Image (cartoon, grey):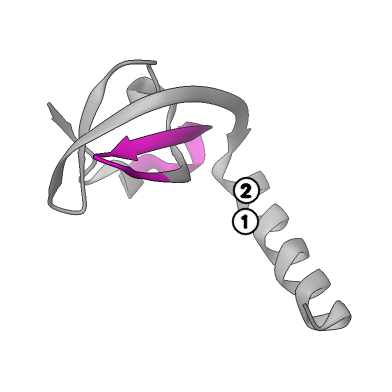
Amino acid sequence: MEKLIGVNKMAKRIVYRQCKLKLGSYTDTAWIPEKFAQKGKYLEIKGKNGWQVVEVGDRMSKDDIKVLEREHLHTREVTDI
């Protein structure tokens, strides 16, 4: 079980993957560092053990993810969704 702690020290050099994660019956989607994004791998995230990587998707840099998040928030504000 690997821990996702301290990965932000070299954030600009890290590539992230959008992954579908599962913990028991709960599923979530998150951007995690590419080195942890391996289908079937179990991770510890924010102190919770047992997150399984179910699907591995798109690849993006942290800076690109931040732009995407800002655009998404702006769209929500403008459309009042």
Q: How crowded is mark 2: few (under 14 residues within 10 Å), some or many (20 or more)?
A: some
Question: For residue 57: magenta?
Answer: no
15 is higher (above) or lower (below) than 11: above
- Magenta region includes residue 20: yes
Tell me which segment is drawn in magenta: 10-27
Label 2–label 1 contact, CB within 8 A:
yes
Q: What residue type is labelled 1?
A: Lys
Q: Residue at x 29, y 29 (%)?
A: 52
Q: Which mark is residue 65?
A: 2
Whole-percent x, y for residue 10 in the image: 38, 41
Q: Is mark 2 on a helix, strand or loop?
A: helix
Q: In this view, does 15 lie to the left or right of 73?
A: left
Name above or below for residue 42 compared with residue 44.
Answer: above
Query: Callout 1: few (<14), some (14-19), or many (20+) C-alpha neighbours within 10 Å?
Result: few
Q: Which amino acid does label 2 sit on?
A: Ile
Q: Quick one: SS at disc 1?
A: helix
Front residue of this view, candidates 37 and 12: 37
- Where in the figure is residue 34, as x and y percent of width and height? 43, 25
Which corner quadrant of the image does residue 57 belong to?
A: top right
Residue on which the image places disc 1: 66
Say which quarter of the image contains residue 27. top left
Label 2 and label 1: CA atoms lie apart by 4 Å
Name the residue located 61 percent from the left edge and 27 percent from the top edge. 59
Question: Who's the residue at 47% across and 44% down the image?
Answer: 30
Q: In which quarter of the image is the C terminus?
A: bottom right
